[in-house]
Image: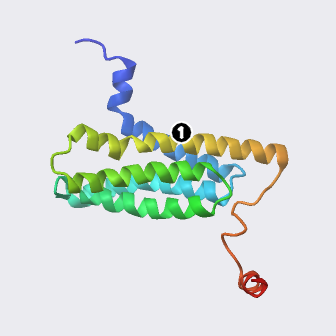
């Protein structure tokens, strides 16, 4: 029997490797001086494969409608909502990349439902590849955040205009 190359081995175990990376990112975001956006996004990225595993155990496979996996659509849609919220309100740029990749993943399911003749490989790429972009964006974003905190100290996690208090909202309305 021929020896399997390390690339083939990694490809075969890519889902397990990806889960390990998400766990490490989550633990680093909890252990280090990471802000709320980092902890929330790391938790969401870890929750996606965990919830996916639970979904496949509960459904004993996949729930398909018009060739699209409805369970994955629901999981990716919920993740998109949370990531979109963080991306709009966080005082960071990298959450926008993570949310944009999630838009691609969610769009892949909608595209599959709309077009029955879509190539299976194209659907798989649209549904799976964004997670690798998210790993890269989360890793770089977390590293840059930790580096920035070391060099410059604490800075706000959220944009000031994102969450107006009642008093600030009233002052803004009266000033206008």
Q: Quadrant of residue 6?
A: top left
Residue depicted at x 44% and y 59%? 80
Tag 1, which secondary structure? helix
Residue depicted at x 49% and y 63%? 82
Q: Position of residue 110 (x, y in %)?
A: 28, 56
Q: Residue furthest top?
A: 2
Please say which color scheme the image uses: rainbow
Q: Quadrant for the C terminus, please.
A: bottom right
Q: Quadrant of residue 148?
A: top right
- List the residue tagged with mark 1: 136
Q: Is residue 12 left or right of residue 92?
A: left
Q: Position of residue 37 (x, y in %)?
A: 62, 58
Residue depicted at x 42% and y 44%? 130
Q: Quadrant of residue 122?
A: top left
Q: Quadrant for the N terminus, please.
A: top left
Is 82 in front, or is 175? 175
Dot 1 alpha-carbon crowd within 10 angstroms: few under 14, some 14 to 19, many 20 or more: some
């Amino acid at each position: 029997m021929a020896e399997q190359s390390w690339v083939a081995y990694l490809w075969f175990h890519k889902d397990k490797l990806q889960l390990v990376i998400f766990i490490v990112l989550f633990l680093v975001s909890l252990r280090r001086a990471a802000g709320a956006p980092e902890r929330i996004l790391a938790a969401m990225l870890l929750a996606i494969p965990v919830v996916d595993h639970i979904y496949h155990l509960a459904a004993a496979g996949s729930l398909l409608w018009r060739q699209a996996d409805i369970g994955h659509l629901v999981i990716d849609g919920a993740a998109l909502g949370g990531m979109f919220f963080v991306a709009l309100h966080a005082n960071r740029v990298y959450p926008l990349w993570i949310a944009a990749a999630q838009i691609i993943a969610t769009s892949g399911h909608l595209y599959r439902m709309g077009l029955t003749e879509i190539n299976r490989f194209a659907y798989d790429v649209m549904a799976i590849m964004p997670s690798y972009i998210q790993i890269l964006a989360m890793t770089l974003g977390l590293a840059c955040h930790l580096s920035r905190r070391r060099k410059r100290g604490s800075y706000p996690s959220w944009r000031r205009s994102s969450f107006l208090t009642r008093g600030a909202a009233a002052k803004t309305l009266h000033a206008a």
